[in-house]
Each structure stands twice: as C-alpha cells, then as structure tokens.
Image (cartoon, rainbow, N blue to C red):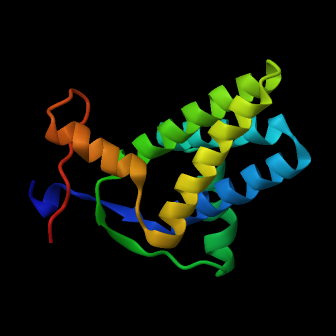
C-alpha cells in the first residue's frame, strides 16, 4: 500500500490510553470495583469505534495535550489495528465486568489482568498484541482486516 494512502496516528495519544487503562484497572482490582472495569470497557469500546466522545481521547486532546504535559508523537500508521486492539480490550473488560457482576470473580479478574498485561506490553515494549492479530488476519485474507502493515 502506498504511503500516501496512510493516515497519521499519534503515538502519545495511544500511550495515554494504555497508561489510563493500566492505572484504572489496577485501581479497580485493588478496590474490587467493577464500575471502573466497566468504565474502561466503555472507554475502549468508544476508542475502538473511533468515537469523538471516547474518554481517553478527550482526556488527551482536551486536557493533557493543550496543557503541554504531553507532546504529540505523530507518525504514519494505520489506525485500524489500534482500534481493533481497543475493541478486543473492550470485549475482555466487558465480559470481565459481567463475570464480576455474576459472582465469578476469578474469571472476571483474570480477564482484567490479561488486559493489564497486554497494555503493559504495549506501553513498555511497544508491542501491540491486538495490532499483531489484526495484521495476521489481514495476511490470512479475513474479511474486514483490509490494511496491510507499513514497511519503511
């Protein structure tokens, strides 16, 4: 795919979402608070759907970036793999919330800790498991996974 067909992705915005996910989910675990898990699930769902009302996006674009606390780090990339990763996180946290509400805390917290682990992998080592999955589906020709990786 030609680079001129690519869009820009702000790595700082993505990392903000990862950091907020990690912090909020650990706080949810410590407080045994399913509402925080549900909030993160909704935040990830809205981010994955590219909603202008996605909470992490609003926090970054309306508070952190204008305050100068964080600087944009924009690069050429496909946003779809990142959105897919957020949707996978939303599913895990949504099912985790339901499990916690249904009295299955082991399952609920296991799903939450998977998201925490994967968000940490992405935040600290810049490896997005959901993005990797997206590109594997693209390579296999799975419908809906139309973007190929960028090769510089």
Q: Residue at x 64, y 42 (%)?
A: 43
Q: Residue furthest top?
A: 102
Q: Position of residue 100 (x, y in %)?
A: 78, 28
**Which quadrant of the figure has residue 68?**
bottom right
Q: Residue furthest right?
A: 31
Is 48 left or right of 25, judged from the image as shown? left
Q: Decide which of 109, 3 is in the foreground and name it.
A: 109
Q: Residue at x 33, y 44 (%)?
A: 133
Q: Residue at x 54, y 79 (%)?
A: 71
Q: Residue at x 24, y 37 (%)?
A: 137
Number of labelled discs? 0
Q: Position of residue 152 (x, y in %)?
A: 15, 72
Q: Decide which of 70, 96 is in the foreground and name it.
A: 96
Q: Position of residue 75 (x, y in %)?
A: 33, 70
Q: Is residue 152 above or below residue 136?
A: below
Is 76 left or right of 127, judged from the image as shown? left
Question: From where the camera sits, is residue 146 visible?
Answer: no
**Which quadrant of the figure has residue 9?**
bottom left
């Amino acid at each position: 795919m030609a680079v001129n067909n690519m869009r820009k992705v702000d790595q700082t915005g993505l990392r903000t979402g990862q950091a907020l996910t990690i912090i909020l989910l650990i706080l949810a675990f410590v407080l045994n608070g399913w509402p925080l898990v549900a909030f993160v699930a909704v935040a990830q769902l809205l981010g994955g759907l590219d909603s202008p009302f996605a909470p992490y996006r609003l926090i970054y674009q309306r508070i952190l970036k204008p305050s100068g606390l964080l600087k944009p780090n924009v690069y050429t990339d496909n946003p779809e793999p990142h959105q897919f990763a957020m949707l996978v996180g939303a599913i895990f946290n949504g099912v985790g919330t339901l499990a916690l509400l249904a009295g299955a805390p082991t399952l609920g917290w296991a799903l939450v800790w998977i998201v925490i682990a994967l968000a940490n992998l992405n935040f600290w080592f810049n490896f997005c498991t959901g993005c990797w999955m997206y590109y594997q589906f693209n390579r296999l020709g799975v419908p809906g996974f139309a973007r190929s990786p960028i090769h510089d």
